[in-house]
């Protein structure tokens, strides 16, 4: 079955349905990033403080305590499950776009690696491997970049890239 470029042949109502899904999904994804920025200042030391606490910092404006094992397992479990579904659905949509095979494969597979590195890294950081905060920051940024690029490609090819809708 040929999937490359199939998105151009979708009926208009399916394209609108996909676009609505992608836009709402993106709102949820980027709202989550606002939360991450609010709780960690989007930097490795903020990530460490969010999960390990800051009780020893007498100058901290907001007191944070080390997360419990139950909190950590819940966070890792919920994020890995939900984000794997998100990236599976985005990958399915992306598979129908017209892209080079290498780029498409990278954009479809990389987010799963980043999910494991980001949330596995958060758990390892909590376990005391402090250097993991850099892995978490890098993999989280890469995950966001691949999500954004994938969504932009999908939306572009749904409407702008399809010459039949420009009549």
Image (spheres, rainbow, N blue to C red):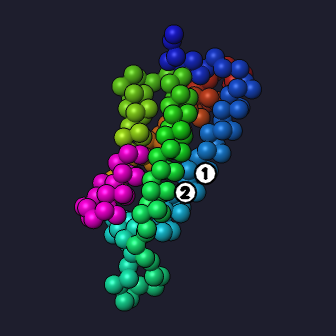
Q: Where residue 29 sits: x, y (%)?
A: 56, 50
* Residue 103 belongs to the span the image colors magenta: no
Disc 2 target residue: 32
Marks 1 and 2, Cα distance to the nearest angstrom? 6 Å
Disc 1 target residue: 28
Residue sticking out furthest to the top = 1
Residue 46 in sight in this render: no
Q: Are marks 1 and 2 in contact (CB under 8 Å)?
A: yes
Q: Is residue 24 above or below residue 55?
A: above
Q: Residue at x 38, y 79 (%)?
A: 54
Q: Is residue 27 left or right of residue 109?
A: right
The residue range painted magenta reads 115-135
Q: Residue at x 69, y 38 (%)?
A: 20
Residue sticking out furthest to the front = 70
Residue 111 in sight in this render: yes
Q: Residue at x 49, y 40 (%)?
A: 84
């Amino acid at each position: 079955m040929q999937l490359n470029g199939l998105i151009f042949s979708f009926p208009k109502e399916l394209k609108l349905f996909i676009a609505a899904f992608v836009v709402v999904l993106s709102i949820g994804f980027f709202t989550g990033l606002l939360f991450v920025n609010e709780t960690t200042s989007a930097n490795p030391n903020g990530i460490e403080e969010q999960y390990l606490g800051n009780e020893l910092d007498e100058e901290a404006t907001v007191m944070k305590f080390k997360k419990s094992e139950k909190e950590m397992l819940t966070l890792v479990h919920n994020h890995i499950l939900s984000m794997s579904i998100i990236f599976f659905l985005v990958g399915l949509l992306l598979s129908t776009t017209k892209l080079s095979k290498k780029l498409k494969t990278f954009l479809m597979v990389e987010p799963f690696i980043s999910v494991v590195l980001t949330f596995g890294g958060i758990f390892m950081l909590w376990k005391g491997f402090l250097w993991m905060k850099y892995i978490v920051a890098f993999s989280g940024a890469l995950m966001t970049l691949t999500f954004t690029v994938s969504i932009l490609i999908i939306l572009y090819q749904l409407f702008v890239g399809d010459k039949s809708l420009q009549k």
